[in-house]
Image (cartoon, rainbow, N blue to C red):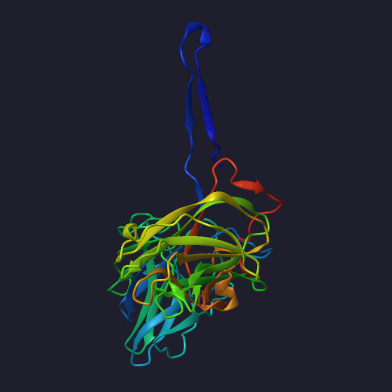
Amino acid sequence: MWRSLIVVSFILPSVGMAANLTIQQPSAQMIGFMPTLATNTTVVTSTGLLGIGFVAPASPFSGTMRLQDITIYVSAVNTAPKLTAKLVSDNAGVPNYTSGVIETGTESAALSAGNWYTLSGFTTTSNLTAGTQYWIVLVCTTGTSVTVQYTIPGTLAFPPIGAYTAGSGMSWGETSATSADTGSTWTGGYGGIAGFRIGFTDGTDNAYRGIAISAFAWANGATEKLFTDTGTAQEVGSRFTMPANAKVSVCAVGMQARQSGPPTGNLRFRIYSGSEMTLLGTTLGIPPGNVRSGGLNFYISRFTTPITMSAGTLYTVTAGNTAADDSTHYHSVYKYTIQNDATSAGLLPFGGMVLAKNSGGSWSTVTTEVVPFAIYLCTGSEFLSVSAGGPHAWVQ
Protein backbone atom coordinates (compact mmCIF):
# COMPACT_ATOMS: atom_id res chain seq x y z
CA MET A 1 0.00 0.00 0.00
CA TRP A 2 1.04 3.62 -0.38
CA ARG A 3 2.54 5.36 2.62
CA SER A 4 3.09 9.06 3.22
CA LEU A 5 6.74 9.89 2.69
CA ILE A 6 8.26 12.81 4.57
CA VAL A 7 11.68 13.98 3.48
CA VAL A 8 13.44 16.46 5.75
CA SER A 9 16.55 18.28 4.58
CA PHE A 10 18.35 20.81 6.76
CA ILE A 11 21.62 22.60 7.43
CA LEU A 12 22.72 23.18 11.01
CA PRO A 13 21.79 26.60 12.38
CA SER A 14 25.48 27.22 13.09
CA VAL A 15 26.02 27.87 9.41
CA GLY A 16 23.23 30.43 9.35
CA MET A 17 20.83 28.74 6.90
CA ALA A 18 17.13 27.92 7.34
CA ALA A 19 15.73 24.38 7.33
CA ASN A 20 13.84 23.09 4.28
CA LEU A 21 10.92 20.68 4.57
CA THR A 22 9.62 18.65 1.61
CA ILE A 23 6.46 16.61 2.03
CA GLN A 24 5.30 14.11 -0.59
CA GLN A 25 1.67 13.01 -0.39
CA PRO A 26 0.86 10.08 -2.71
CA SER A 27 -2.59 9.98 -4.31
CA ALA A 28 -5.40 8.48 -2.27
CA GLN A 29 -6.32 4.89 -2.98
CA MET A 30 -9.75 4.34 -4.48
CA ILE A 31 -12.19 1.50 -3.92
CA GLY A 32 -15.75 1.16 -5.15
CA PHE A 33 -17.74 0.77 -8.33
CA MET A 34 -17.37 3.55 -10.89
CA PRO A 35 -17.35 2.29 -14.47
CA THR A 36 -18.59 4.55 -17.25
CA LEU A 37 -20.44 2.32 -19.66
CA ALA A 38 -21.83 2.38 -23.16
CA THR A 39 -24.34 -0.03 -24.63
CA ASN A 40 -23.18 -2.34 -27.38
CA THR A 41 -25.32 -4.84 -29.28
CA THR A 42 -24.59 -7.68 -31.67
CA VAL A 43 -27.20 -9.18 -33.97
CA VAL A 44 -26.67 -12.96 -33.81
CA THR A 45 -27.88 -15.03 -36.76
CA SER A 46 -27.07 -18.47 -38.17
CA THR A 47 -23.97 -17.01 -39.81
CA GLY A 48 -23.38 -13.87 -37.75
CA LEU A 49 -21.79 -14.94 -34.45
CA LEU A 50 -20.87 -13.27 -31.16
CA GLY A 51 -17.88 -14.52 -29.19
CA ILE A 52 -17.41 -13.69 -25.49
CA GLY A 53 -13.89 -14.44 -24.36
CA PHE A 54 -12.76 -15.19 -20.81
CA VAL A 55 -9.75 -16.53 -18.95
CA ALA A 56 -10.57 -19.53 -16.79
CA PRO A 57 -9.94 -18.59 -13.14
CA ALA A 58 -8.37 -20.74 -10.46
CA SER A 59 -10.91 -23.34 -9.42
CA PRO A 60 -12.65 -22.90 -6.04
CA PHE A 61 -13.78 -26.54 -6.20
CA SER A 62 -12.36 -29.80 -4.95
CA GLY A 63 -13.43 -31.40 -8.24
CA THR A 64 -12.59 -30.47 -11.84
CA MET A 65 -14.01 -27.11 -12.95
CA ARG A 66 -16.07 -26.93 -16.14
CA LEU A 67 -18.32 -24.43 -17.86
CA GLN A 68 -21.91 -24.53 -16.63
CA ASP A 69 -23.76 -21.70 -18.40
CA ILE A 70 -23.81 -18.10 -19.58
CA THR A 71 -26.54 -15.57 -18.76
CA ILE A 72 -27.14 -12.85 -21.37
CA TYR A 73 -29.53 -9.95 -21.95
CA VAL A 74 -31.68 -10.01 -25.12
CA SER A 75 -32.78 -6.57 -26.36
CA ALA A 76 -34.50 -7.54 -29.66
CA VAL A 77 -35.66 -10.65 -31.54
CA ASN A 78 -36.92 -11.62 -34.98
CA THR A 79 -39.32 -14.56 -35.62
CA ALA A 80 -39.16 -16.39 -32.26
CA PRO A 81 -35.43 -17.21 -32.40
CA LYS A 82 -33.47 -19.68 -30.30
CA LEU A 83 -29.81 -19.49 -29.30
CA THR A 84 -27.11 -22.06 -28.68
CA ALA A 85 -23.85 -21.40 -26.82
CA LYS A 86 -20.62 -23.20 -27.75
CA LEU A 87 -17.43 -23.44 -25.71
CA VAL A 88 -14.51 -22.76 -28.05
CA SER A 89 -10.73 -22.66 -27.66
CA ASP A 90 -8.66 -19.55 -28.44
CA ASN A 91 -6.63 -18.92 -31.58
CA ALA A 92 -4.34 -15.90 -31.04
CA GLY A 93 -7.05 -13.68 -29.58
CA VAL A 94 -10.13 -14.89 -31.48
CA PRO A 95 -12.36 -17.98 -31.24
CA ASN A 96 -11.01 -21.11 -32.93
CA TYR A 97 -14.49 -21.82 -34.24
CA THR A 98 -13.60 -23.90 -37.29
CA SER A 99 -11.65 -26.59 -35.42
CA GLY A 100 -11.72 -25.74 -31.71
CA VAL A 101 -15.32 -26.27 -30.57
CA ILE A 102 -14.95 -28.06 -27.23
CA GLU A 103 -18.64 -28.54 -26.52
CA THR A 104 -22.05 -27.34 -27.70
CA GLY A 105 -24.72 -26.47 -25.16
CA THR A 106 -28.46 -27.06 -25.34
CA GLU A 107 -30.62 -24.97 -27.66
CA SER A 108 -32.66 -22.42 -25.73
CA ALA A 109 -36.41 -22.01 -25.78
CA ALA A 110 -37.83 -19.27 -28.03
CA LEU A 111 -36.56 -15.87 -26.83
CA SER A 112 -38.36 -12.55 -26.39
CA ALA A 113 -36.97 -9.02 -26.10
CA GLY A 114 -36.16 -7.29 -22.84
CA ASN A 115 -35.28 -10.38 -20.80
CA TRP A 116 -32.35 -12.23 -19.26
CA TYR A 117 -31.71 -15.79 -20.45
CA THR A 118 -29.37 -18.53 -19.29
CA LEU A 119 -27.84 -20.81 -21.94
CA SER A 120 -26.66 -24.13 -20.53
CA GLY A 121 -26.40 -27.83 -21.35
CA PHE A 122 -22.64 -28.31 -20.94
CA THR A 123 -21.34 -31.60 -19.52
CA THR A 124 -18.16 -33.03 -18.02
CA THR A 125 -16.36 -32.80 -21.38
CA SER A 126 -16.00 -29.03 -20.99
CA ASN A 127 -13.20 -29.15 -18.39
CA LEU A 128 -11.34 -25.83 -18.03
CA THR A 129 -7.68 -25.12 -17.34
CA ALA A 130 -6.99 -22.17 -15.04
CA GLY A 131 -5.25 -19.27 -16.78
CA THR A 132 -6.29 -20.41 -20.25
CA GLN A 133 -8.26 -18.22 -22.69
CA TYR A 134 -11.62 -19.60 -23.86
CA TRP A 135 -14.57 -18.28 -25.83
CA ILE A 136 -18.32 -18.75 -25.57
CA VAL A 137 -19.74 -18.36 -29.09
CA LEU A 138 -23.45 -17.59 -29.51
CA VAL A 139 -25.25 -18.74 -32.68
CA CYS A 140 -28.90 -18.40 -33.69
CA THR A 141 -30.07 -21.96 -34.40
CA THR A 142 -33.80 -21.33 -34.98
CA GLY A 143 -35.60 -18.22 -36.24
CA THR A 144 -34.01 -15.19 -37.86
CA SER A 145 -31.98 -13.21 -35.34
CA VAL A 146 -31.35 -12.32 -31.70
CA THR A 147 -29.90 -8.98 -30.62
CA VAL A 148 -27.63 -9.57 -27.61
CA GLN A 149 -26.89 -6.49 -25.52
CA TYR A 150 -23.80 -6.00 -23.37
CA THR A 151 -21.78 -3.10 -22.04
CA ILE A 152 -18.37 -1.78 -23.05
CA PRO A 153 -15.97 0.51 -21.17
CA GLY A 154 -16.19 4.28 -21.32
CA THR A 155 -13.55 6.84 -20.45
CA LEU A 156 -13.80 6.25 -16.69
CA ALA A 157 -14.23 2.50 -16.79
CA PHE A 158 -12.09 -0.07 -15.11
CA PRO A 159 -10.23 -1.42 -16.91
CA PRO A 160 -9.96 1.68 -19.15
CA ILE A 161 -9.86 -0.28 -22.39
CA GLY A 162 -11.63 0.17 -25.71
CA ALA A 163 -11.60 -1.67 -29.01
CA TYR A 164 -8.90 -4.17 -29.87
CA THR A 165 -7.66 -5.83 -33.03
CA ALA A 166 -8.77 -9.38 -33.80
CA GLY A 167 -5.92 -11.85 -33.54
CA SER A 168 -3.99 -9.67 -31.11
CA GLY A 169 -3.43 -12.58 -28.74
CA MET A 170 -5.45 -10.92 -25.99
CA SER A 171 -5.48 -13.24 -22.99
CA TRP A 172 -7.01 -11.32 -20.11
CA GLY A 173 -10.42 -10.25 -18.84
CA GLU A 174 -13.71 -10.61 -20.68
CA THR A 175 -13.63 -9.61 -24.36
CA SER A 176 -15.87 -9.69 -27.42
CA ALA A 177 -15.40 -10.59 -31.09
CA THR A 178 -17.82 -10.96 -33.99
CA SER A 179 -17.96 -13.01 -37.18
CA ALA A 180 -20.13 -12.50 -40.26
CA ASP A 181 -19.14 -15.73 -42.03
CA THR A 182 -20.00 -18.54 -39.59
CA GLY A 183 -16.74 -18.21 -37.71
CA SER A 184 -14.25 -18.34 -40.59
CA THR A 185 -12.94 -14.85 -39.81
CA TRP A 186 -13.39 -12.61 -36.78
CA THR A 187 -13.44 -8.88 -36.09
CA GLY A 188 -12.10 -7.61 -32.78
CA GLY A 189 -14.62 -6.09 -30.42
CA TYR A 190 -13.93 -4.73 -26.94
CA GLY A 191 -11.98 -5.62 -23.85
CA GLY A 192 -13.33 -5.24 -20.33
CA ILE A 193 -16.95 -5.93 -21.32
CA ALA A 194 -19.80 -6.59 -18.85
CA GLY A 195 -23.53 -7.22 -18.94
CA PHE A 196 -23.45 -11.01 -18.68
CA ARG A 197 -22.71 -13.77 -16.16
CA ILE A 198 -20.63 -16.93 -16.59
CA GLY A 199 -21.30 -19.98 -14.43
CA PHE A 200 -18.82 -22.70 -13.49
CA THR A 201 -19.36 -26.04 -11.72
CA ASP A 202 -17.66 -29.26 -10.65
CA GLY A 203 -20.94 -31.13 -10.86
CA THR A 204 -21.78 -30.49 -7.20
CA ASP A 205 -21.07 -26.83 -6.38
CA ASN A 206 -21.49 -23.74 -8.56
CA ALA A 207 -19.52 -20.49 -8.92
CA TYR A 208 -20.08 -17.35 -10.99
CA ARG A 209 -18.38 -14.26 -12.35
CA GLY A 210 -19.48 -11.19 -14.31
CA ILE A 211 -21.64 -8.10 -13.77
CA ALA A 212 -25.20 -8.46 -15.06
CA ILE A 213 -26.06 -4.86 -16.04
CA SER A 214 -28.93 -4.37 -18.49
CA ALA A 215 -29.35 -0.56 -18.60
CA PHE A 216 -28.02 2.72 -17.24
CA ALA A 217 -29.50 6.20 -17.04
CA TRP A 218 -29.63 9.38 -14.98
CA ALA A 219 -31.57 9.15 -11.72
CA ASN A 220 -34.12 11.77 -12.73
CA GLY A 221 -37.33 10.33 -11.29
CA ALA A 222 -39.55 12.55 -9.14
CA THR A 223 -38.15 10.96 -5.96
CA GLU A 224 -34.55 10.94 -7.22
CA LYS A 225 -33.78 14.51 -8.27
CA LEU A 226 -31.43 16.14 -5.78
CA PHE A 227 -33.31 19.05 -4.26
CA THR A 228 -35.42 19.62 -1.13
CA ASP A 229 -38.85 18.00 -1.30
CA THR A 230 -41.56 18.61 1.37
CA GLY A 231 -38.95 20.08 3.70
CA THR A 232 -36.41 17.24 3.43
CA ALA A 233 -33.42 17.10 1.12
CA GLN A 234 -33.73 14.29 -1.42
CA GLU A 235 -30.66 12.04 -1.56
CA VAL A 236 -29.73 9.13 -3.82
CA GLY A 237 -26.91 6.61 -3.50
CA SER A 238 -26.01 2.99 -2.80
CA ARG A 239 -26.25 0.83 0.33
CA PHE A 240 -23.81 -2.01 1.03
CA THR A 241 -21.98 -3.86 3.78
CA MET A 242 -18.23 -3.46 4.19
CA PRO A 243 -16.31 -6.76 3.79
CA ALA A 244 -15.61 -8.69 6.96
CA ASN A 245 -11.85 -8.12 6.68
CA ALA A 246 -11.78 -4.37 6.01
CA LYS A 247 -11.67 -1.32 8.27
CA VAL A 248 -10.69 1.81 6.38
CA SER A 249 -10.21 5.54 6.75
CA VAL A 250 -12.08 7.49 4.06
CA CYS A 251 -11.17 11.04 3.02
CA ALA A 252 -13.40 11.58 -0.07
CA VAL A 253 -16.30 10.30 -2.17
CA GLY A 254 -16.78 10.44 -5.95
CA MET A 255 -19.79 9.90 -8.24
CA GLN A 256 -20.90 10.58 -11.79
CA ALA A 257 -23.18 13.60 -11.63
CA ARG A 258 -24.64 16.52 -13.56
CA GLN A 259 -26.81 19.60 -12.95
CA SER A 260 -30.02 20.82 -14.59
CA GLY A 261 -31.69 24.18 -14.38
CA PRO A 262 -29.16 25.14 -13.06
CA PRO A 263 -29.54 24.60 -9.30
CA THR A 264 -28.42 27.18 -6.75
CA GLY A 265 -27.12 24.63 -4.27
CA ASN A 266 -23.82 22.75 -4.19
CA LEU A 267 -23.39 19.08 -5.00
CA ARG A 268 -22.27 17.18 -1.90
CA PHE A 269 -21.81 13.57 -0.74
CA ARG A 270 -22.57 11.84 2.57
CA ILE A 271 -21.87 8.57 4.35
CA TYR A 272 -24.39 7.03 6.75
CA SER A 273 -24.01 3.92 8.90
CA GLY A 274 -26.54 1.28 9.87
CA SER A 275 -30.19 0.82 9.01
CA GLU A 276 -30.96 3.75 11.33
CA MET A 277 -29.01 6.01 8.91
CA THR A 278 -26.62 7.64 11.35
CA LEU A 279 -24.85 10.47 9.51
CA LEU A 280 -21.06 10.06 9.72
CA GLY A 281 -19.99 12.95 7.56
CA THR A 282 -20.74 15.38 4.72
CA THR A 283 -18.19 16.41 2.11
CA LEU A 284 -17.43 19.94 1.05
CA GLY A 285 -19.89 21.26 -1.55
CA ILE A 286 -19.08 21.53 -5.25
CA PRO A 287 -20.56 24.77 -6.66
CA PRO A 288 -23.13 24.24 -9.45
CA GLY A 289 -20.99 26.32 -11.80
CA ASN A 290 -18.36 23.58 -11.55
CA VAL A 291 -20.80 20.78 -12.35
CA ARG A 292 -21.59 20.24 -16.03
CA SER A 293 -25.12 19.91 -17.39
CA GLY A 294 -24.26 17.20 -19.93
CA GLY A 295 -22.00 14.22 -20.41
CA LEU A 296 -20.79 11.60 -17.97
CA ASN A 297 -18.48 13.47 -15.63
CA PHE A 298 -16.99 12.25 -12.38
CA TYR A 299 -16.86 14.55 -9.35
CA ILE A 300 -14.91 14.06 -6.12
CA SER A 301 -15.28 15.95 -2.86
CA ARG A 302 -13.43 15.58 0.44
CA PHE A 303 -14.47 15.32 4.05
CA THR A 304 -12.93 17.83 6.45
CA THR A 305 -12.36 14.94 8.89
CA PRO A 306 -11.67 11.34 7.81
CA ILE A 307 -14.55 8.87 8.13
CA THR A 308 -13.93 5.42 9.63
CA MET A 309 -15.77 2.57 7.89
CA SER A 310 -15.67 -0.65 9.91
CA ALA A 311 -15.75 -4.28 8.82
CA GLY A 312 -19.12 -5.98 8.49
CA THR A 313 -21.06 -2.72 8.92
CA LEU A 314 -23.94 -1.47 6.76
CA TYR A 315 -23.23 1.86 5.02
CA THR A 316 -25.05 4.17 2.60
CA VAL A 317 -23.10 6.57 0.36
CA THR A 318 -25.29 9.30 -1.14
CA ALA A 319 -25.28 12.47 -3.22
CA GLY A 320 -27.38 15.53 -2.45
CA ASN A 321 -27.96 19.23 -2.99
CA THR A 322 -27.27 21.90 -0.34
CA ALA A 323 -30.17 24.16 -1.42
CA ALA A 324 -33.93 23.76 -1.78
CA ASP A 325 -34.16 24.42 -5.54
CA ASP A 326 -36.98 22.50 -7.31
CA SER A 327 -37.82 19.79 -9.86
CA THR A 328 -36.41 21.87 -12.72
CA HIS A 329 -33.31 23.06 -10.85
CA TYR A 330 -31.43 20.09 -9.40
CA HIS A 331 -28.41 17.80 -9.44
CA SER A 332 -28.61 14.13 -10.40
CA VAL A 333 -26.41 11.04 -10.35
CA TYR A 334 -26.07 8.02 -12.66
CA LYS A 335 -27.60 4.62 -11.93
CA TYR A 336 -27.47 1.11 -13.39
CA THR A 337 -30.25 -1.45 -13.78
CA ILE A 338 -29.10 -4.94 -12.82
CA GLN A 339 -30.37 -8.49 -12.87
CA ASN A 340 -31.29 -8.77 -9.21
CA ASP A 341 -31.47 -12.48 -8.54
CA ALA A 342 -29.34 -13.54 -5.58
CA THR A 343 -26.49 -14.84 -7.74
CA SER A 344 -26.08 -11.77 -9.96
CA ALA A 345 -26.61 -9.30 -7.11
CA GLY A 346 -23.87 -11.00 -5.10
CA LEU A 347 -21.36 -10.43 -7.91
CA LEU A 348 -21.53 -6.64 -7.46
CA PRO A 349 -18.79 -4.87 -5.49
CA PHE A 350 -18.95 -5.41 -1.71
CA GLY A 351 -20.85 -8.65 -2.38
CA GLY A 352 -24.01 -6.76 -3.31
CA MET A 353 -25.46 -3.24 -3.34
CA VAL A 354 -28.89 -1.63 -3.69
CA LEU A 355 -30.00 1.87 -4.61
CA ALA A 356 -31.04 3.88 -1.54
CA LYS A 357 -32.90 7.17 -1.57
CA ASN A 358 -34.48 9.65 0.81
CA SER A 359 -37.59 11.50 -0.39
CA GLY A 360 -40.02 13.36 1.83
CA GLY A 361 -38.12 12.29 4.93
CA SER A 362 -38.46 8.55 4.24
CA TRP A 363 -35.66 6.20 3.17
CA SER A 364 -36.33 3.41 0.67
CA THR A 365 -34.32 0.96 -1.42
CA VAL A 366 -34.55 -0.40 -4.98
CA THR A 367 -33.05 -3.87 -5.43
CA THR A 368 -32.96 -3.70 -9.24
CA GLU A 369 -30.74 -0.60 -9.36
CA VAL A 370 -27.41 0.65 -8.02
CA VAL A 371 -25.54 3.95 -8.08
CA PRO A 372 -21.84 3.60 -8.99
CA PHE A 373 -19.47 5.43 -6.65
CA ALA A 374 -15.94 5.45 -5.29
CA ILE A 375 -14.57 6.08 -1.83
CA TYR A 376 -11.02 7.36 -1.42
CA LEU A 377 -8.83 6.10 1.40
CA CYS A 378 -6.67 8.50 3.38
CA THR A 379 -3.05 8.06 2.36
CA GLY A 380 -0.85 6.80 5.17
CA SER A 381 -3.69 5.36 7.25
CA GLU A 382 -5.80 3.62 4.60
CA PHE A 383 -6.39 0.31 6.34
CA LEU A 384 -7.00 0.74 10.04
CA SER A 385 -7.00 -3.00 10.62
CA VAL A 386 -7.06 -6.18 8.55
CA SER A 387 -8.46 -9.42 9.89
CA ALA A 388 -7.52 -12.90 8.74
CA GLY A 389 -8.88 -14.16 5.45
CA GLY A 390 -9.43 -12.51 2.09
CA PRO A 391 -12.51 -11.31 0.25
CA HIS A 392 -14.87 -13.79 -1.28
CA ALA A 393 -13.94 -14.35 -4.93
CA TRP A 394 -17.02 -16.40 -5.78
CA VAL A 395 -20.74 -16.57 -5.26
CA GLN A 396 -21.73 -20.19 -4.65
Q: Where's residue 28, x and y in %?
A: 50, 46
Position of residue 176 in the picture relative to residue 121 (left or right): left
Residue found at x 44% / y 63%? 174
- Badge count: 0
In the rendered image, which quarter contains the C terminus?
bottom right
Q: Residue at x 66, y 71 (%)?
A: 205
Q: Position of residue 358 (x, y in %)?
A: 53, 74
Left or right: where does residue 81 sit relative to residue 318?
left
Q: Relative to residue 353, is residue 134 drawn left or right?
A: left
Horizontal and vertical percent for residue 298? 39, 58
Instruction: Residue at the far right: name it.
Output: 388
Residue lying farthest bottom? Answer: 79
Q: Is residue 34 visible?
A: no
The quadrant where residue 351 appears: bottom right
Q: What residue is drawn where x is 46% and y is 66%?
A: 320
Q: Position of residue 247 (x, y in %)?
A: 65, 52
- From the image, which quarter does the N terminus lie in? top right
Q: Nearer the viewer, residue 132 or 354?
A: 354
**Nearer the observer, 369 or 127:** 369
Q: Nearer the viewer, residue 215 or 141?
A: 215
Residue 308 visible to the viewer: yes
Front one among 104 and 282? 282
Relative to residue 252, is residue 2 depicted above or below? Answer: above
Picture quadrant of residue 189: bottom left
Q: Is residue 20 above or below residue 314?
A: above
